Amino acid sequence: MHEKDTGELFSELREDEDIRGFLARNKGEFVRPLHEYLEELLREKHLKKLEVIRAAGLERAYGYHIFAGSKPKPSRTKLLPIALAMGLDLEETQKLLRYAGESMLYPRNPWDSVIISAIAQGLSVKEVNALLSQLGETKFLG
């Protein structure tokens, strides 16, 4: 968990003439690889990769590639089902998207609003796809 906000890091960085020292002191503040965050979430939530991959509706090999880090830039439409399958809250989901280099959910976007609401309600991927379809929005998976 990050202890400093981005503003604090900017201040330190502007004032510090020693980039090596800054990097060493703030090692825990940097964004980690996506697969490390996924592993942490699996441990915290006592989940198994295969269960999450199945619940997310992902092809098994593809899902394992995401969790192993050999697919370092999965799309939002692959990550969000993982977030739902893991039962992530909005903050955890936003962090997942950020670690993947994807845009975070934005409530001014109708599709994103549906996903934000689904996360708050604890809906499954299947339920979210049905809701997206009912609302005339694009589903996660074909």
Image (cartoon, rainbow, N blue to C red):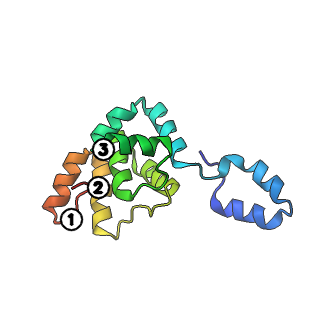
Between the C-alphas of marks 1 and 2, the distance is 14 Å
User: At 25% across and 47% down in the image, what residue appears?
Assistant: 125
Is residue 87 shown to the viewer in this render? no
N-terminal of the pair, mark 2 or mark 3, is 3
**Mark 3 highlights which residue?**
59
Give coordinates of residue 142: x percent, y percent. Answer: 21, 56
**Mark 1 highlights which residue?**
137
Give coordinates of residue 119: x percent, y percent. Answer: 32, 50
Q: Three-letter amino acid code at disc 1?
A: Glu
Q: How crowded is mark 1: few (under 14 residues within 10 Å), some or many (20 or more)?
A: some
Whether residue 29 is situated above or below residue 135 in the rendered picture: above
Q: Which of 53 and 15 is in front in this view?
A: 53
Give coordinates of residue 106: x percent, y percent. Answer: 39, 65
User: At 65% across and 48% down in the image, what residue appears?
Assistant: 3
Name the residue furthest left. 134
Q: In which quarter of the image is the N terminus?
A: top right
Q: Three-letter amino acid code at disc 2?
A: Ser
| Element type where label 2 sits in the image | helix
Whether residue 31 is situated above or below residue 12 in the rendered picture: above
Disc 3 + disc 1, Cβ < 8 Å: no
**Mark 2 highlights which residue?**
117
Q: Three-letter amino acid code at disc 3?
A: Glu
Mark 3 or 1: in front is 3
| Element type where label 1 sits in the image | loop
User: At 35% across and 66% down in the image, what residue appears?
Assistant: 107
Between the C-alphas of marks 2 and 3, the distance is 26 Å
Disc 1 + disc 2, Cβ < 8 Å: no
Q: Which of 77 and 87 is in front in this view?
A: 77
Q: Nearer the viewer, residue 10 or 74?
A: 74
